[in-house]
Amino acid sequence: MILLIIIPIFFLLAGLVLFASMRRRDLDTAVGQLSRETRKRDRGESPVTPDEEGPTTGREVERAAALERRPPELEKVGAADLTAFVPPDPDTIGVTRRQFFNRSIVLFFALGLSSFGAAVLAFLWPVPKGGFGSKLRVGKVSDLQSQITAAKGFLYNAEGRMWMTNYPSSAIDKAKKVYSQPVLNSMEAGIVVVYQKCPHLGCRVPSCGTSQWFECPCHGSQYNQAGEKKGGPAPRGMDRFSTEVTDGVLNVDTGTVIPGPTIGTNTTGQEAEGPHCVGGGSH
C-alpha cells in the first residue's frame, strides 16, 4: 500500500526535476532567468560603453559568458597537413633471432629440469607389489616337482624370470658347504631356483633338452641342472634368489639376487647326458 503512494510521488518529482532542467538548458542563450529588478534596470539604463552600437542587457552578458565556457572546437585539418605513413620496423613487432635463441635455450633448460625431476620422482616412488623384484608365492613344492618332471627337468617361471629344477636329497650335505641358508631353503625341499640371466654378459640362458644342462647361446657358457658352471667364459655359476618354504609352499624373493657358486663347484656330479646345444662340450 505504501509503495502505491510512494511510486507516483517519485515519478512526479522526477518529472518536475526534468522539466526544470529543460527550461535551464540553453546552448546559445543565457543560462537561468533574470530577476525582475534586473529587467527593469536594463530597460531604463543607457549603453554600457559608448563604443558599442546598442545597449547591452544582462541576458546578453550571461550569453557571452556561457559561450566562453563552451569548449573550443577542434580545428579541421586538411589533406595537405597529414603526415606520410611510415611502416613499423619488423624487429619491433616480431621476434628477433636473438630473442628466438634465448627463448629456445630457456625452453630446453626447462624441459631438461622437468625430465630430471620426473626421473627423481620415479626413482623415489615405491615399487609396486607383485612381479619381478618382489616376493612371489610360486606354489606348493609337491606340485612344482611334478611340473618340473613333466617339463623334462626344467620349469620356467616368467613372472620371476627364473628356472626351477629338481635337486637330489643325496647332495644336500655338499650343498650346505657351498650355499647360504636363503638358497638352501628351497634345495632342502628338493628344488633349485636359479636366475635366468647369464653371469657373463647377461644373456637369457635356456635349457638344453639333450645334454640336460643350461647352455648360453651368446658365448657358450654351460651349467649343470643345479646351475653350477661346467664350461665357457662365465666367471661363476648361475645366480640365485633368496627362498623360503612355509607350510610346503615355495616363496621366492626376486628382489634379492645372490651370486652363483664359484668355478669348480659340482655338488650333484651331473655330467652331460647327451649332445650339447651350444659349443662342443665341457671344458
Image: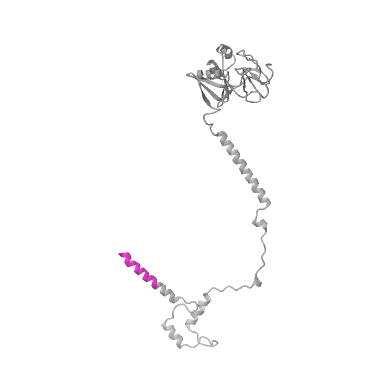
The percent coordinates of residue 281 (x first, y second) are 68, 17
Which color scheme is applied?
one colour
Which of these two is toward me, 231 or 27? 231
Residue 276: x percent and y percent?
Answer: 66, 18
Look at the image and tell me whether residue 181 can be seen.
no
Residue at image position (57%, 34%) is: 123
Residue 6 magenta-drawn?
yes
Residue 156, located in which quarter of the rendered image? top right
How many badges with numbers are in the image?
0
Residue 72, position as x, y percentages in the image: 56, 74
Q: Quadrant of residue 161?
A: top right
Quadrant of the drawing holding the C terminus:
top right
Residue 61 appears in the picture as rendered? yes
**Magenta residue check for 97:** no
In the image, is 19 to the left or to the right of 200? left
Q: Quadrant of residue 212?
A: top right
Nearer the observer, 198 or 209:
209
> x and y percent of residue 282 in the render?
67, 16
Residue that extends furthest to the left in the rendered view of this protein: 1
Q: In this view, does 241 lie to the left or right of 80?
A: left
Chief SS of the magenta region: helix
Q: Which residue is drawn at 67% across and 57% down?
A: 90
Pick the quarter of the image with the N terminus: bottom left
What span is in magenta? 1-16
Q: Say which of 150 and 167 sits in front.
A: 150
24 or 192, which lies in front?
192
